[in-house]
Image: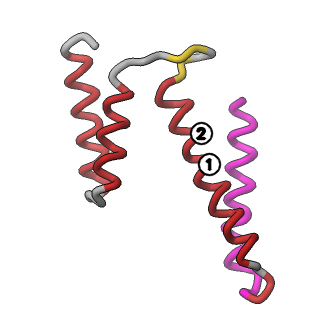
């Protein structure tokens, strides 16, 4: 599974590089939209795998509320460093409380 994520990430990165090398007239709106959706999908899959999965099992722990806080703050367009710090504080606080 990790090999799949690495290969897909390399594919998306190569598309990003190709975007700088290929003249604009060769890149259709459909291809650009596809590239955007693939990037977002891979990021969502990575967050899902790292956020709620441990091995082959789902584990609901302090990471879920931390991800929710991070998502809310990103939606509110809070600076990224504050998003990361807030999510870490939420996860740390919940783990300190035993969750």
What residue sits 51% from the left and 38% below the top?
47
The answer to which quarter of the image holds residue 21 is: bottom right
Check whether the beta carbons of the residues at disc 2 and disc 1 lie within 8 A of each other. yes
The quadrant the N terminus occupies is top right
User: How many numbered marks, from 0 up?
Assistant: 2
What residue sits 37% from the left and 27% below the top?
63
- Callout 2 crowding tier (Cα within 10 Å): few <14, some 14–19, many ≥20: few
What residue sits 26% from the left and 18% below the top?
95
Q: Which residue is mark 1?
A: 41
Asked whether residue 45 is drawn in magenta, I would say no
Is residue 21 left or right of 42 when viewed as pictured? right
Please, what is the dominant secondary structure of the magenta stretch? helix
The residue nearer to you, when weighing 32 against 81, is 32
81 to 92, vertically: above or below: below
Residue 8 coordinates in the image, percent (x, y):
73, 47
- Callout 1 crowding tier (Cα within 10 Å): few <14, some 14–19, many ≥20: few
The quadrant the C terminus occupies is top left
Q: Alpha carbon of mark 2 to alpha carbon of mark 1: how far? A: 6 Å
21 to 88, vertically: above or below: below
Residue 32 coordinates in the image, percent (x, y):
69, 71
Q: Residue furthest right?
A: 26
The residue nearer to you, when weighing 8 against 31, is 31
The answer to which quarter of the image holds residue 68 is: top left
Q: Which residue is mark 2?
A: 45
Q: Residue furthest top?
A: 98
Q: Which residues are magenta?
A: 1-24
The answer to which quarter of the image holds residue 4 is: top right
36 to 27, vertically: above or below: above
Q: Secondary structure at mark 2?
A: helix
Q: Secondary structure at mark 1?
A: helix
Asked whether residue 5 is drawn in magenta, I would say yes
């Amino acid at each position: 599974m990790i090999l799949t994520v690495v290969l897909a990430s390399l594919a998306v990165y190569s598309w990003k590089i190709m975007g700088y090398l290929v003249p604009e007239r060769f890149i259709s709106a459909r291809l650009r939209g596809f590239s955007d959706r693939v990037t977002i999908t891979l990021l969502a899959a990575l967050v899902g795998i790292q956020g709620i999965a441990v091995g082959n099992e789902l584990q609901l722990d302090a990471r879920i509320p931390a991800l929710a806080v991070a998502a809310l703050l990103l939606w509110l367009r809070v600076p990224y460093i504050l998003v990361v710090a807030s999510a870490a504080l939420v996860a740390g606080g919940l783990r300190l409380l035993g969750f």
